[in-house]
Image (cartoon, rainbow, N blue to C red):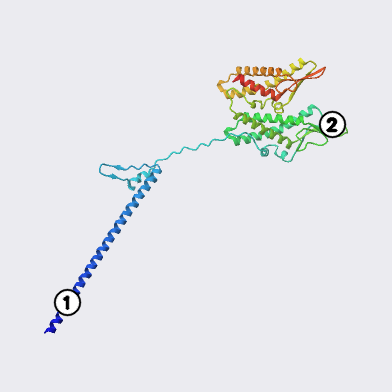
Amino acid sequence: MSLINNKFLSLTNRLQLQAQAKILQQEQQEEKKLEQQKQSETSLRSDESSTQTRAQSSSISDDLLLTYRGININHIETAQQKTVVTMDTLMPMLSNPQPVNIAPLEVKKEPKPATVSNSVINSSSIASQYNSGVVREGHRGLKTPSKLEAITDMARGDLNAVADAIKSELKAQMGSDYNEKEVQRAIDAAIEQTLKVFSDNEERRRTEAGVNDNAFIFKKKGGLLGIIGTYTYNVQALTNTFLSSYNEIATELFNDSQQEKAPGAIGKGVVVGSGVYTSYKENEKKTSTSMIKFKAMNDVKEMARADMSALTDTIREQLKGELGSGYNDSLVRASINEAIERTINQFAQNEGRGVENGFEYKRKSFFRSTCSYNVGNLIDSFIVNFNEINV
């Protein structure tokens, strides 16, 4: 009996222990489920927060982008809440964007002189003669002034052909900045200067003119005396001299136009195209000779007066273009005449040997005396006097 009771108690204890272990296992499983549920909720809240942050960031980026494009985003606010514009309300704005007016950038042209390169010859009517180094010849005969005049006219024709090419090229290059009168002034002055150089360098010899001869060459033919022959010139040499002279003159005119001058004032550019230009450029010395000093001085004064008067038309034309309706021709003419007489008196008072801004007097012999002046110095003094009077 006692043995049976012990077995029963042992079985009862084992069942109780098993029941307690099962309850403990269930509690652990419940705790694990609660822990997993908490982790899931935490992860969910984190994802929602991240999503909201990205949405706000995207909204801010969209706002910045749309503001940059000129679209004004209005946030509608009330006393209770703030309503943010969404993509649904932005769509009408995006489908009808307002145009942004951008003012065009104005590019100011830098003024330049009306110069050309030697390639302009290729578009002239004498291109082939230039490239092949053709030598022009006048009529055969005695060396007379008429023969020199004839070859000069022939050379002038070649230079006019190059001048036409210059004007065509500059019109295409400069457009609205092209000034026909200024270009023609430079061309005329360059032609006269070139022809004077070739005439002054005139030479008599047995060979014709070469590419390096800036001169009219009288080529002698037949006989030992060589009094019969023909004038010649090289087209290439003539054209190169002309283009060099033209570019120099065009640059002078440009530089003169860029200088600031008071209304009614003139610069050295007025000399270009005048009858005294070549003498002015070369600082030519003009002289009057007479047995009597008084007569020599009067003659040189008249020569100087004529040189200054040669600028009258150029001065009038320039000031008329600059002053417009404010131009008074009678006053300008009066200023020119007064400046001429003032300059004459200054040079007469500065008479002596070796003077620059004055009439130089020399007694060569008992029967011969000379009075002379430098054309460049005379014209420069005249311009200064005119500006003092007219401005």
Residue 314 shown left or right of residue 204 in the figure? left
Amino acid type shown at disc 2 = Ile
Residue at far right of view: 224
Q: Where does residue 54 sit, x and y in percent of width and height?
A: 35, 52
- Badge 2 density bin: few <14, some 14–19, many ≥20, Cα 10 Å: some
Please tell me which of labels 2 and 1 falls first in the chain: 1
Q: Quadrant of residue 146?
A: top right
| Marking on residue 228 | 2
**10 or 169, which lies in front?**
10
Q: Which residue is drawn at 64% across and 26% down?
A: 268
Q: Residue at x 82, y 30 (%)?
A: 141
Local secondary structure at mark 2? strand
Dividing the image into 4 quarters, which one contains the N terminus? bottom left
Residue 198 shown left or right of residue 169 in the figure? right
Q: Where does residue 269 sit, x and y in percent of width and height?
A: 64, 27
The residue pinned by badge 1 equals 13
